Image (cartoon, rainbow, N blue to C red):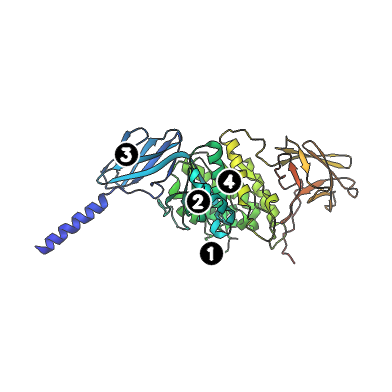
């Protein structure tokens, strides 16, 4: 009799355990849901179990039934930004999600310069502590995790952005969110999914890398380390795939240093990665990224070539790039400490391009065309309508060459949004380069104080030999 009783208790315990509604971690109290959208709520339950959801902003009740795979999904409509609200889920058990805000949600991803936080030395964030309670910002930080196959959950949790939660959250991400919150006056949800040192291949689905001869060959240059994954797809599977049901406004990205040895494949790699993310989310969301900063790498030219590859990604729809060379004070530090202005420049891109707010300037000048007239090279630029200015008496990192491919420091005359470049030793100019080196920091800006992006007008071979 005791045996039967024990079996019965175990059966009831097991049935009760499996009958409960369960949610992925991305759905929880304190979260921010994307405003004015059809948003998915999903999870697991006993097959056939009815799930009823009530949203407090409209008191609407939505229902569905868990399928044979113990999965369920219900679409809800979110209102205009506001809150706090609650969501009640009722099945064989009851879950109440509280302190929910409706606003704008962004993913903050990349390697160490996106990951870097107060706890890693960005102490300027301490100045924000006293103001955090005036801002409706929520944080979801994903722990470093890998997987060989796509996962449907991770171990992050939503937190109110207070002086404790912010200490381990991306500084770039926080400053980006802060400016969106101030200018849009809506709650902001930031999802931190980043890992220092990671090459972009690990953020791209494995099959898209391995089925592409060019990308697969490039991935072989990612040597195993004790500190981060290098296998294609491993971070995507564990740190991006679990998020794709969650409605977002867009993504910011700061990565590239770990792909410096394979700049020739980087443009295609990032286009492939972005395309895969957009397909997974089923949304052509904006992708705004940071061009890597000047740094003294161990090989000549690799940083310049990677920045050039990043600039080429601007041909992809709904992308934007911020240039930060002027924010660097030490080219021996691969982690520039001024994350505040990086976040601000990313925010200005989003405020103009995504939200339609008018700003005086939000893009750095980009080389457009070269014309040779007599002994001068005349250069035109996109995004320089406010006019160009030289900070200082002489241009820095500006060089000109003739057909012999010997570059000389150039003199420059500025005419509105044009540069007139020359050198007495170059009688017949052919090419111009600006800040096209690993460590070069130029001094040409827009009148709105945005630095000109590095460029070269030639396609000559670049020296990538080891430094001596």
Q: Are marks 3 and 2 in contact (CB under 8 Å)?
A: no
Mark earlier in primary sequence (1, 4)? 1
Query: Which dot, 1 or 4, sits closer to the camera?
Result: 1
**Residue picked out by circle 2:** 192
Quarter holding residue 116: bottom right
Q: Position of residue 127 (x, y in %)?
A: 57, 51
Q: Does residue 393 appear in the picture of this structure? A: yes
Mark 3: few/some/many CA within 10 Å (<14, 14-19, 20+): many
**Residue picked out by circle 4:** 271
Mark earlier in primary sequence (4, 3)? 3
- Identify the disc placed on residue 53: 3
Query: Which dot, 3 or 1, sits closer to the camera?
Result: 3
- Taking depth in this image into account, of 216 and 49 the one nearest to the observer is 49
Q: CA distance from mark 3 to mark 2?
A: 28 Å
Query: Which dot, 2 or 4, sits closer to the camera?
Result: 2
Q: Is residue 352 above or below residue 268?
A: above
Q: Are marks 2 and 4 in contact (CB under 8 Å)?
A: no
Helix, strand or loop status at disc 1: loop
Quadrant of the frame with the C terminus: bottom right
Mark earlier in primary sequence (1, 2)? 2
**Residue drawn 46% across and 35% down?**
81
Q: Does residue 272 appear in the picture of this structure? A: no
**Residue picked out by circle 1:** 227
Q: CA distance from mark 1 to mark 2?
A: 19 Å
């Amino acid at each position: 009799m005791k045996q039967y009783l024990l079996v019965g208790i175990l059966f009831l315990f097991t049935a009760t355990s499996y009958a409960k509604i369960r949610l992925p971690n991305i759905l929880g109290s304190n979260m921010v849901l994307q405003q004015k959208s059809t948003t998915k709520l999903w999870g697991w339950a006993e097959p056939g179990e009815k799930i009823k959801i009530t949203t407090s902003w409209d008191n609407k009740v939505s229902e569905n039934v868990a399928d044979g795979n113990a999965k369920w999904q219900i679409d809800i409509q979110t209102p205009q930004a506001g809150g706090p609200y609650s969501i009640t889920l009722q099945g064989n058990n009851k879950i109440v999600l509280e302190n929910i805000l409706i606003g704008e949600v962004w993913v903050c991803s990349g390697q160490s310069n996106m990951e870097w936080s107060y706890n890693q030395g960005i102490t300027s964030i301490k100045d924000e502590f006293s103001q955090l309670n005036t801002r409706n910002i929520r944080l979801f930080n994903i722990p470093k995790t890998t997987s060989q196959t796509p996962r449907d959950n991770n171990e992050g949790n939503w937190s109110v952005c207070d002086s404790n939660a912010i200490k381990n959250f991306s500084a770039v991400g926080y400053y980006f969110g802060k400016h969106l919150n101030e200018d849009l006056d809506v709650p902001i949800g930031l999802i931190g999914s980043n890992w220092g040192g990671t090459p972009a291949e690990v953020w791209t689905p494995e099959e898209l890398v391995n089925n592409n001869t060019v990308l697969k060959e490039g991935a072989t240059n990612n040597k195993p380390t004790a500190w981060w994954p290098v296998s294609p797809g491993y971070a995507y599977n564990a740190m991006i795939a679990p998020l794709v049901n969650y409605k977002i406004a867009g993504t910011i990205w700061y990565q590239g240093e770990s792909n410096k040895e394979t700049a020739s494949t980087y443009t295609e790699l990032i286009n492939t990665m972005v395309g895969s993310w957009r397909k997974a989310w089923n949304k052509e969301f904006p992708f705004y990224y940071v061009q890597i900063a000047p740094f003294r790498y161990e090989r000549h030219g690799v940083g310049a070539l990677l920045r050039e590859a990043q600039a080429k990604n601007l041909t992809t729809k709904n992308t934007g790039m911020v240039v930060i060379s002027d924010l660097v004070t030490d080219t021996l530090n691969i982690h520039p400490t001024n994350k505040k202005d990086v976040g601000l420049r990313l925010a200005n891109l989003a405020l103009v391009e995504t939200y339609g707010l008018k700003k005086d300037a939000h893009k750095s000048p980009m080389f457009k065309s070269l014309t040779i007239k007599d002994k001068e090279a005349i250069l035109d630029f996109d995004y320089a309508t406010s006019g160009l200015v030289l900070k200082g008496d002489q241009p820095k990192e500006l060089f000109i060459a003739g057909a012999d491919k010997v570059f000389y420091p150039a003199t420059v005359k500025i005419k509105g949004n044009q540069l007139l470049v020359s050198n007495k030793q170059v009688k017949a100019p052919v090419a111009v380069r600006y800040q096209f080196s690993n460590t070069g920091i130029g001094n040409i800006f827009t009148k709105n104080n945005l630095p000109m992006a590095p460029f070269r007008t030639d396609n000559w071979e670049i020296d990538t030999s080891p430094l001596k």
